[in-house]
């Protein structure tokens, strides 16, 4: 069926992508904490699963005449389990939606 302009699929796909990413990052964080609690320290598997890459932005200072505030810093920490979490949520979301 052709898109007749009644449904904004671009916006819906963007929202679906954002929801998948956020839920996947939460699931990856949960998996990371689970591995931290269960695997013994010093093992190669634990080191592989928990080695992460961190990216941060900020702080951003905004000074208006009446209001001043600081945002940040915002940090994103990615490891193998966060990628697995995003992949699991993406597979589930593709079956559901």
Image (cartoon, rainbow, N blue to C red):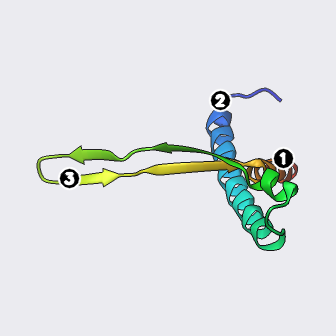
Q: Is residue 49 above or below residue 9?
A: below
Mark pair 3, 1: CA separation: 43 Å
Q: Nearer the viewer, mark 3 or mark 1?
A: 3
Q: Residues within 10 Å of mark 1 (few under 14, many from 20)?
A: few
Residue 28 in view (yes/no) = yes
Residue located beneath label 3 in the image? 68
Q: Earlier in the sequence, mark 1 or mark 2?
A: 2
Q: Nearer the viewer, residue 55 or 14?
A: 55
Q: Position of residue 18 (x, y in %)?
A: 64, 46
Q: Nearer the viewer, mark 2 or mark 3?
A: 3
Mark pair 2, 3: CA separation: 43 Å
Q: Position of residue 42 (x, y in %)?
A: 80, 62
Q: Earlier in the sequence, mark 3 or mark 1?
A: 3
Residue located beneath label 1 in the image? 94
Q: Earlier in the sequence, mark 2 or mark 3?
A: 2
Residue 97 in view (yes/no) = no
Mark pair 1, 2: CA separation: 23 Å
Outermost residue on the bottom side: it is 37
- The disc at residue 48 is none
Question: Which quarter shows the N terminus?
Answer: top right
- The disc at residue 5 is 2
The answer to which image quadrant residue 33 occupies is bottom right
Q: Is residue 47 left or right of residue 45?
A: left
Q: Position of residue 72 (x, y in %)?
A: 40, 51
Q: Residue at x 74, y 57 (%)?
A: 28
Q: Is residue 94 left or right of residue 23?
A: right
The secondary structure type at the circle numbered 3 is strand
The secondary structure type at the circle numbered 1 is helix
Q: Nearer the viewer, mark 1 or mark 2?
A: 1
């Amino acid at each position: 069926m052709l898109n007749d302009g009644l449904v904004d699929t671009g916006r819906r796909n963007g929202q679906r992508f954002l929801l998948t990413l956020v839920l996947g990052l939460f699931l990856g964080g949960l998996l990371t904490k689970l591995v931290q609690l269960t695997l013994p320290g010093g093992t190669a598997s634990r080191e592989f699963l928990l080695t992460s890459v961190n990216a941060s932005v900020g702080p951003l200072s905004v000074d208006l005449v009446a209001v001043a505030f600081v945002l940040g810093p915002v940090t994103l920490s990615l490891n193998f389990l966060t990628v697995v979490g995003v992949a699991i949520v993406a597979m589930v979301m593709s079956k559901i939606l």
